[in-house]
Image (cartoon, rainbow, N blue to C red):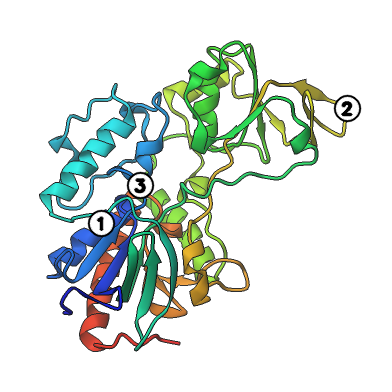
Amino acid sequence: MNDFGARDGVRDIDVVVIGAGQAGLSGAYHLRRLGLGPDRDFVVLDHAPRPGGAWQFRWPSLTYGAVHGMHALPGMELTTVRADDARPSAEVIGGYFTAYEERFGLRVRRPVDVRTVREGAAGRLLVGTSAGAWSARALINATGTWDRPFWPRCPGQETFRGRQLHTADYPGPGEFAGLRVVVVGGGASGTQHLMEIERVAAGTTWVTRRPPVYREGPFDEELGRAAVALVEERVRKGLPPRSVVSVTGLPVTEDIARARAAGVLDRLPMFNRITPEGVAWDDGRAVAADVILWATGFRPAIGHLAPLGLRERGGGIRVEGTRAVRDERIHLVGYGPSASTIGANRAGRAAAREIVRLLERDPAAVPSG
């Protein structure tokens, strides 16, 4: 492996890992297990101010007990931290990620913003960041989606006199007391927001583009594999990935069942326009609102990879396993089928193994073309 050094202000390294959420930490852990040393053979760059990945930005009312499907990172169980259900998920998971980084000596550099990844010299990748540049032989991209909230465009949106905000900026239910709130979005975040806000708001309206699909009964391994396969099929075709959650449906928890019975989750179809006073449909129906909350999801944060030309005509990056088909040096972890926490763990291991084979096979790490 290369010695960690700098030339002309560019530091040489074998592997750059971008992102220190579940996917990035999994990749870094497996690189270390395979014999690579942090800050000598690989470096982990994270733009967040502290450990915790996207979890550190979640709203305070999202307690750990309300989190569905959180899997431990490889090599260290969640029971090593105080993971009681009543604590905010940001605190529990942030503390867990902090302990994890320390236990395995992963030496994450933060806050570091990765601005571009482009072709460098001698078949290497040039990673430009707010903390300087690295020249790498391979890269694990684990940037997730939290930094790219999706805001649908709607006629009249700029005329609304109330407040508009996205899940990424959701402060918890307290700020909506006594207000009329329209929640847009049929996923888990939308239903969680709605059920919280309904308790304090003057009124709530739930709007979704499609009727919600509820999932009764346990989510077993067979259903999980089927859901992941649907997402994987899209990325293999070079289409933008849908989240795994979007194809599994909404699990009918006790809270969901109560909200449905009380009429809280009675939905309206997507409105046709936004007015200064609220939202309106072409059939003449209108709802007055003080707030529109867009729980409309996120898109992969991969703009820094644009100089490499990895996108297909369909708009996504075509991936086999974790490897970008257009460039075998690039592995996307936490993208598409590996966006779940358990999927990110497995993908981190797969990416690390392929990268080590690449490094051993080709010291120059020449691109695949």
Nearer-N-terminus badge (1/3): 1
Residue underneath mark 2: 284
Residue 265 sits above or below residue 360 on the image:
above
Answer with the quarter of the image where residue 290 lies: top right
Pick the residue in front: 25 or 41. 41
Q: Judge whether residue 322 can be spotted in this image.
A: no
Categorize mark 1 by other alpha carbons within 10 Å: few (<14), some (14-19), many (20+): many
Q: Position of residue 286 (x, y in %)?
A: 81, 24
Q: Amino acid at mark 2?
A: Gly
Label 2 secondary element: loop
Q: Position of residue 243 (x, y in %)?
A: 49, 51
Q: Amino acid at mark 1?
A: Ser
Nearer-N-terminus badge (2/3): 3
Q: Position of residue 9 (x, y in %)?
A: 30, 73
Categorize mark 2 by other alpha carbons within 10 Å: few (<14), some (14-19), many (20+): few
Label 3 secondary element: loop
Instruction: Decide if residue 62 is on the left or right side of residue 1.
Output: right
Residue 339: image tag = none
Residue 48: image tag = 3
Residue 155 sits above or below residue 255 on the image:
below
Q: Nearer the viewer, mark 1 or mark 2?
A: 1
Residue underneath mark 1: 26
Q: Amino acid at mark 3?
A: Ala
